[in-house]
Image (cartoon, helix red, strand yellow):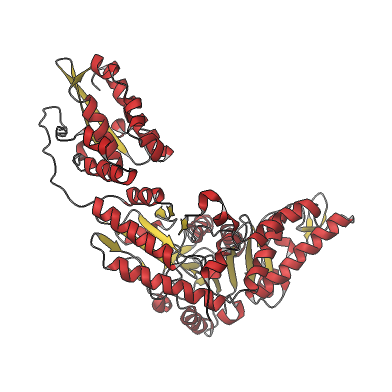
Amino acid sequence: MNFDPDAFKEFFPLFAQPENRDLIYLDNAATTQKPRAVIEAVTDFYLHSNANTHRSSHRLARRATEMVERVRRQAAVFLNAASPREVIFCRGATEALNLLAYSLCSGLRPGDEIVISTAEHHANIVPWQMMAQRHGLTLRYVPHIAGIPEFQRLHEVLNERTRIVSLTGGSNALGLRPDLEGIARQLRGCRSRGRELHWIVDGAQLAAHETVDVQSIGCDFFVCSAHKFYGPSGIGLLYGRESLLRRMPPWQGGGEMIATVDLHSSDYADLPHRFEAGTSPLAAIAGLGAALEFLADRDRAAMAAHEQSLLARLHREIAELPGVRLISEPKQNLGILAFVPENGSATDLVHWLDEKDIAVRVGHHCAQPLIRAAGETATLRASLAAYNTADDVERFIESLRDYLSASETVPEQVALSSTAGWSGDNLSALQLERLAAQRNWQDRYRELMRWGKSVSEKPAIRRSENLVRGCESDAWLVHREENGKHFFALDSDSRVVKGLGALLLSQVDGCRAEEVRARDLKELFAELGLEKHLSQSRSNGFYALLQRVLDCIACGPA
């Protein structure tokens, strides 16, 4: 089971591009990179087979139709479905879940119940909320502790009104992999008492890291997206038991999903086409076929073992770092590290890493109930794929150590007193020369973050009228004029935005309008190398703050 991630990485042309040769890509839970075979399959379809399917007799249409049905057969093997008729092409897992919610709930009665969990992606929450409101259904949640579902207690929320159980096969926010066998046992116990219910598995994350066997799992429906497992975007799979699919009403109406149409009624096509209205994303289906072939030729168990080795190291070493709070756990985890820095913001950290050519993601990851229950508004997520290496992990950890060192606590500056309902900050100790003297961009970034610590929290100014539009992170700016001099105060959740604000205010606070206008602050920003090294959104944030300052001195006090 030896696996060589460097050799595996050579299949992916993105990493061979000059601008990406040093890239460490740890955003795989959002989307994976594409192997050359997938890219070539998409191109080949447009070069040699571009035509619509099923309803034309010319050779291009026949070739396209043959390709679609061949990929459907491949997908049935990939999922271990009993028949290709059980595989429906959708745009992705989100569309598949919406299809299931619409079709399954249309036959339910008011008061029937749907069970989901707090760990679900929004795509496995919102469609059920919509259908519950439309049909008078009840949503119930698996018991949880601080947002983490206790799936072994699923039976506690099952009753005679339970009709649908739709649960994640792996959390995209924490990597949590439920015990699907345990869930199946509990559902069998419920069904043995004569209750009819349908079990859906959202396998968007699962299919990327494990071999899927829907018959072994025992679920009624399974959904996944190709772009999560090295395939193209815009195409996904819905597996459903044939007997259940035949009883479900179609979701969308139009071409391809009909047999005959007259003015007052229509007959629908047989499975699976009755659920595939309109023109399918044919090039994406061709790419999906290439992705399935690519994975079929790989040692999936060795890939998974490699990912788990990296994941264990990430959790072990980052757990030892001061100033980091881990949210994820390595056990029963599909390849995700989630944490928050205790000093500074996760947004600042993700930009720090981006400057070091490390791609991660920050936010609630379309799992707001779970993240809020964990006591957070956003986490930083690093997610693994088989092309990640031990060197990738080492660089990520070292970069995180550098950030934490730059974020160490320094004495707060004393805030200026004011009778205007808010206090400014004493920025007199900030030395522009010291910022300009830093030898490289990383040192200058550290100095800018230290400047951010000079800006104190000001809850009183966090009002909508003080919000500065255009900053990547929320920023609030207030102004007053005293004896012809202009004074400002700033607040933000982002240390870097505070640092940029401190830079700006150090040049304008306490100055007269003519003094401010005489200074070329845009040029100063460029001379310090900030425009060159900061992201476009961060640069735009500085200019938005500058424009607010200029508007204030032009109009007088707010």
Closer to the camera in the image, 409 or 289: 409
Q: Is residue 531 rendered to the left or right of residue 91?
A: left
At 38% across and 64% down in the image, what residue appears?
Answer: 394
At 36% across and 68% down in the image, what residue appears?
Answer: 314
Q: Quadrant of residue 65?
A: bottom right
- Residue 127, visible in the rendered structure: yes
Q: Is residue 267 rendered to the left or right of residue 4?
A: right
Give residue 53's position: percent from left, percent from top.
80, 56
Give residue 107's position: percent from left, percent from top.
61, 64
Quadrant location of the C terminus in the rendered image: top left
At 51% across and 80% down in the image, what residue appears?
Answer: 184
Measured along the vertical axis of the image, is residue 10 above or below residue 492? below
Give residue 95's position: percent from left, percent from top.
59, 57
Closer to the camera in the image, 205 or 93: 205
Q: Quadrant of residue 277?
A: bottom right
Closer to the camera in the image, 67 or 22: 22
